[in-house]
Amino acid sequence: MVNDPNLPRSKRPDLLARFGSFLRERFSLEEDKDDEESIIQYISRGIEFRGINSWTLIFAIFIASIGLNINSPAVITGAFLISPLMGPIMGIGMGVGINDLAMIIRSLKNLSIAVVISLLTSTLYFFLSPLHLAQSELLARTSPTVWDALVAFFGGLAGIVASSRREKVTNVIPGVAIATALMPPLCTAGYGIATANPYYFAGAFYLFLINGICISLATFLIVRFLGYHQKQYPTPEIERRIRQTIWLSVLIVVIPSTYLGYQIVRKTIFEESARRFVANECNFQYRQVINYSAHFNRKHSSVELTLVGEPFPKDSITFLRAKMPAYGLGDASLVVKQGSFKDTEIDVDALKNSLTDQVIKYSQSSIARKDHTIDSLRRYIDLTQSTHVPVADLRNELKTLMPDVQTFTASRSLVINTNKATPDTVMLVYATFSRRHTKSERQRIEKWLQSRTKSKRIKLLIE
């Protein structure tokens, strides 16, 4: 409509202006916006970790740790809702957005205190807990993906927009806390310390840092987009020095995080490509993939397959490697583990799951075959019952109608016409009578047979 060439040129700007006005009205952030000072004070109050906030954090960490320990998503979600970790993280983004170095320093200080409290609490819990097996909820926090960063970024956008309203949207901040998942990574890092597992600690703490940076970045962008006033300092020299300090700090954080974020994207893409490769190309007839792992490395990545069954020939492995470039795995190596597993670490849980899946698939296939057989028998029985003609009953009824009947039989038969591709079904009736019947009597018998047998086509043979 806007680009209609038939419209006068003078009307096109009006339509564009109306459309732009409609978009501004629907997506404006100025409606119900609180004043800047109130928003800054609201975020500033959530920065401090002392008194109630400190104890709330400790209790939330204990709850999240228990949830991770017993693999309960519901318990972990409950810990999200009472966690106060969002305050100092949003405070950092707000401080950068308004050039408030004091707010940034205070936020970093309180965030450091919160992190130390969280690590100490979770480490103490997992050190004392009798359950030391890493469950799936805990393992999910040891390897960050690009999706975690995206969730944190958009969650941060939702959080700062909700915080800028005059009437706070009560369901947004808890939802952001649940979505961005700040507490479980810290609890997992504590588990890594308690069990002396540096891999778990590094992966989980890295996930926490990525989430925190994305939330702060989202807060900074919205603050700048809304045009918050920059903090004024006594002299231009002090203001220039503080701005330089802030942006130098931002660059120190952003440059490494950007590089690490890029590596996360590459790792996520590699793992997804490996998953598709295994799902599409590794379905073998006489051997089974019981486990696979995708190891991403900047210099040399690899995909490892663990097989059971008949040995995999070398030429087949070469052929399988030749298919990897089609999945974006051209630079990765393929490692096939089979035969003797003396020096191979076998994931027992993966083996159990694989065997369970095979049993389930076989059972489902067997049940499907039985259901098909039952359906076939049921259709055969129905067909047999539908084609059965009660000859004796028909003879007795016909004898009442025509007492001179002597012999009688009836059956459904297929009549094949050479001009048609499919045969027709006809009710074939043969009867003998002691006398010759008139045409009207024959028609009366045919109508009775049609009504009695529910058959439209009757072929009556009388002698």
Image (spheres, rainbow, N blue to C red):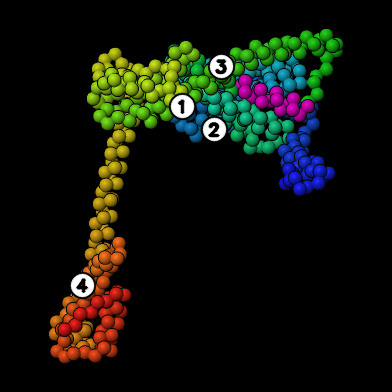
Q: Disc 2 or 4, which lies upstream in sequence?
A: 2
Quadrant position of the C terminus in the picture = bottom left
CA gap, disc 2 and disc 1: 31 Å
Per the rendering, the mark at residue 272 is 1
- List the residue tagged with mark 3: 260
How far apart, in angstroms, are the residues tagged by discs 1 and 3?
Answer: 18 Å
- Name above or below for residue 297 compared with residue 350: above
Q: Give the image location of residue 196, x and y in percent.
A: 44, 12
- Residue 192 image offset from top left, x and y in percent: 47, 16
From which residue to which does the magenta span run? Answer: 212-227
Q: What element does badge 3 sit on?
A: helix
172 and 55: which is toward the camera: 172
Badge 1 or badge 3: first in the primary sequence: 3
Q: Local crowd at mark 1 within 10 Å, few (<14), some, or many (≥20)?
A: few
Residue 21 shown left or right of residue 203 in the figure: right
Spatial distance from mark 4 to mark 1, Cα to Cα? 64 Å
Q: Is residue 215 magenta?
A: yes
- Relative to residue 173, is residue 368 drawn left or right? left
Give whichever of discs 2 and 1 has the lower sequence position. Answer: 2
Which residue is painted at 27% across and 76% down in the image? Answer: 458
